Image (cartoon, grey):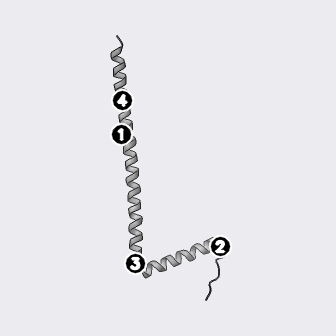
Amino acid sequence: MSEEPPGSVVQATGKVAERIVNGFSNSPGLLLIVLLNVGLIGMAGYALIAIARMSSEGRTQIMSVLEACIAGQDDRRVP
């Protein structure tokens, strides 16, 4: 039994998706592992975005403090 090659990309994608669904239905443990990995990747992405935002906000606060300090030093030098 040989299968006909797909006629288009949509048909090829459909066959791949069908095989994936059949594979997951035969082994639910594999589905659990895939879902767990996808969830962990999502959580890691969220954490990286949160770290980047905190870093950006912290850098902005530090720069404003430094600018205020520099402005304060300049004011003291003027008689």
Q: Using the numbered discs, state the Cα–Cα distance from disc 3 to disc 4 in whole angstroms.
A: 57 Å
Q: Using the numbered discs, state the Cα–Cα distance from disc 1 to disc 2 in whole angstroms.
A: 52 Å
Give the image location of residue 76, x and y in percent: 33, 16
Q: Are marks 1 and 2 in contact (CB under 8 Å)?
A: no
Position of 73 with respect to 26 (left or right) is left
Quarter location, residue 41: bottom left
Disc 1: which residue? 58
Q: Is residue 28 above or below residue 44?
A: below
Q: Earlier in the sequence, mark 4 or mark 1?
A: 1
Q: Is residue 79 above or below residue 60?
A: above
The local secondary structure at tag 3 comes to helix
Q: Using the numbered discs, state the Cα–Cα distance from disc 4 to disc 1 in whole angstroms.
A: 12 Å
Give the residue type at disc 4.
Answer: Leu
Give the image location of residue 24, x and y in percent: 44, 77
Disc assigned to residue 70: none
Give the image location of residue 75, x and y in percent: 35, 17
The local secondary structure at tag 1 comes to helix
Residue drawn at x 61%, y 89% as measured from the top left: 1
Disc assigned to residue 66: 4
- Residue lying furthest top: 79
Residue drawn at x 60%, y 74% as measured from the top left: 12
Q: Is residue 26 above or below residue 50?
A: below
Disc assigned to residue 28: 3
Quarter location, residue 79: top left
Q: Earlier in the sequence, mark 3 or mark 4?
A: 3
